[in-house]
Amino acid sequence: MIETLGLLAVGLAAGTLSGLLGIGGATILIPALLLIFKTSQHLAQGTSIAALLLPVGALALVKYYQAGNVNWRFALLLALGFLIGGLIGGTLAQPLPEMWLKKAFGLYLLIIALQMLFFS
């Protein structure tokens, strides 16, 4: 029961931040699964992707669309690239050691944070 409530709370936080800032999947779900629920990096990444396959952003999308803030051409091209890239990335990630994935993910988040704090 506590695990279920915890997962719902993490999902709520990710959904809220996704709707508010456009973030959620990798930046909220993966760290939460790793740190709170003690999953492996592979399991966290796979679970995060599975959660995003569901219509997670559908209601936020409605609000952005109503405000005229959706470029459908961009979105469809991004989705196509994401689909193909997801297959490539998922295939490449499976044989990698968990420690390497954790370090690569942390480095990615650090680079993005530094870029947004100091270079934008």
Image (cartoon, rainbow, N blue to C red):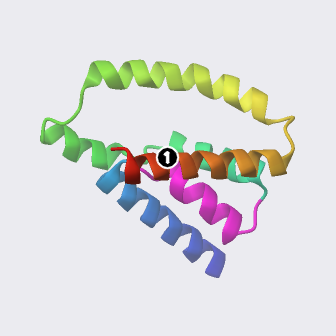
Question: Which is more toward the observer, 79 or 35?
Answer: 35
Residue that lies at the very extreme toward the bottom in this rendered image: 2
Asked if residue 51 can be seen in this view, the reply is no
Q: Residue visible at 28% across and 42% down? A: 61
Direction from residue 117 to residue 84 in the image, left or right: right
Q: Which residue is mark 1?
A: 112
Q: Is residue 71 magenta?
A: no
Q: Which residues are magenta?
A: 23-39
Q: Please state the horizontal and vertical placement of residue 11, each as a whole percent of the image.
A: 49, 62
- Is residue 25 rendered to the left or right of residue 87? left
Secondary-structure class at tag 1: helix
98 up-or-down from 79: above or below: below
Residue type at numbered disc 1: Ile
- Horizontal side of residue 120 vs 28, given as left or right: left
112 vs 57, nearest the viewer: 112
For this view, does 60 lie left or right of residue 109?
left
